[in-house]
């Protein structure tokens, strides 16, 4: 199936995709996705400064749902951040473990109404069709979404690491990878990294979501205390075959 890339530049073109938005932080921007009226899913390295190993200030974060240039379906602040268990690990963890746990759940400071944007559900079944859809912001298109349809799920590795042949760029971190499940869009993964190996097919690298997201939602509901982000946190590092799909500075 041929890949198609569409820029969603106008309000009418964003219709149905308002639940995908741009997450602005003190370090730059990422893509995030509404999975409940007050919960946004993104990549953990989007909300952690891995140089200082501190969670970024949530007071300065803004989620701009359905941003398309001058149009925004909704804007909300962030009141709480939960990271996937294991993300705050040692510097010696494997690349697979880094990607597998590169997930963050953000509670918004107030719910987004159904008239503004609809949340998406997590895909919790076997991936029957290899065709997926990536919706993201990124460098050079940081004020409008790009929808890429027809890219493929290539492989799921042991440990839950997933690869896709989607076209990601800097700023695509946290972007949702969707599968069409009987006419309903479901999130199958979140972009953590992109392949940068020379003479190799470009890949988006993400993780399996159901178990990790369920655990994070339980923590969020229980208002569980999280370990301080003072040591051990790290962004996915650049290696010989892969580099982070980093966030970029706000234009």
Image: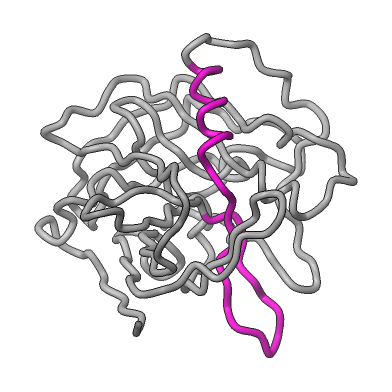
Q: Residue 58 location in percent, x, y?
A: 51, 27
The residue positioned farthest toward the right in the image shown: 92
Q: 194 above or below 82?
A: below
Q: Quadrant of residue 47?
A: top right
Instruction: Say which quadrant the C terminus sits in.
Output: bottom left
Is 247 left, or right, of 101 in this rendering? left
Q: Residue at x 53, y 42 (%)?
A: 209
Highlighted range, magenta: 191-220
Between 151 and 249, the one lying in front of the other is: 151
Q: Residue at x 47, y 52 (%)?
A: 126
Between 141 and 156, the one lying in front of the other is: 156
Q: Residue 250 location in percent, x, y?
A: 45, 53
Is residue 74 one of those drawn in magenta?
Answer: no
Q: 138 above or below 165?
A: above
Is residue 217 one of those drawn in magenta?
Answer: yes
Q: 166 above or below 50?
A: below
Q: Residue 85 location in percent, x, y?
A: 68, 30
Is 31 left, or right, of 96 in this rendering? left
Between 121 and 6, the one lying in front of the other is: 121
Is 56 left, or right, of 167 in this rendering? right
Instruction: Say which quadrant the N terminus sits in.
Output: bottom left
Q: Residue 119 location in percent, x, y?
A: 28, 37
């Amino acid at each position: 199936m041929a890949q198609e890339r569409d820029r969603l530049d106008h309000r009418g073109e964003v219709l149905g995709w308002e639940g995908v938005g741009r997450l602005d932080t003190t370090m730059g921007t990422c893509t995030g996705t509404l999975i409940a009226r007050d919960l946004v899913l993104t990549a953990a390295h989007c909300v952690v400064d891995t140089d200082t190993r501190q969670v970024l200030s949530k007071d300065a974060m803004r989620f701009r749902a359905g941003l398309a240039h001058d149009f925004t379906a909704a804007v909300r602040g962030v009141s709480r951040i939960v990271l996937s268990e294991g993300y705050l690990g040692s510097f010696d963890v494997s690349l697979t473990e880094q990607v597998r746990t590169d997930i963050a759940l953000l509670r918004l400071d107030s719910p987004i109404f159904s008239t503004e944007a609809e949340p998406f559900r997590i895909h919790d079944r076997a991936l029957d069709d290899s065709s997926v859809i990536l919706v993201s912001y990124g460098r050079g298109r940081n004020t409008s979404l790009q929808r890429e349809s027809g890219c493929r799920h290539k492989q799921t590795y042991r440990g839950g690491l997933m690869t896709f042949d989607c076209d990601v760029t800097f700023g695509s971190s946290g972007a949702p990878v969707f599968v069409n499940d009987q006419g309903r869009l479901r999130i199958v993964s979140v972009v953590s990294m992109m392949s940068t190996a020379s003479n190799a097919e470009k890949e988006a690298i993400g993780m399996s979501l159901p178990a990790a997201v369920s655990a994070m939602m339980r923590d969020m509901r229980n208002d569980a205390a999280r370990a301080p982000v003072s040591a051990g946190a790290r962004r996915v590092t650049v290696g010989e075959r892969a580099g982070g799909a980093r966030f970029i500075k706000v234009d």
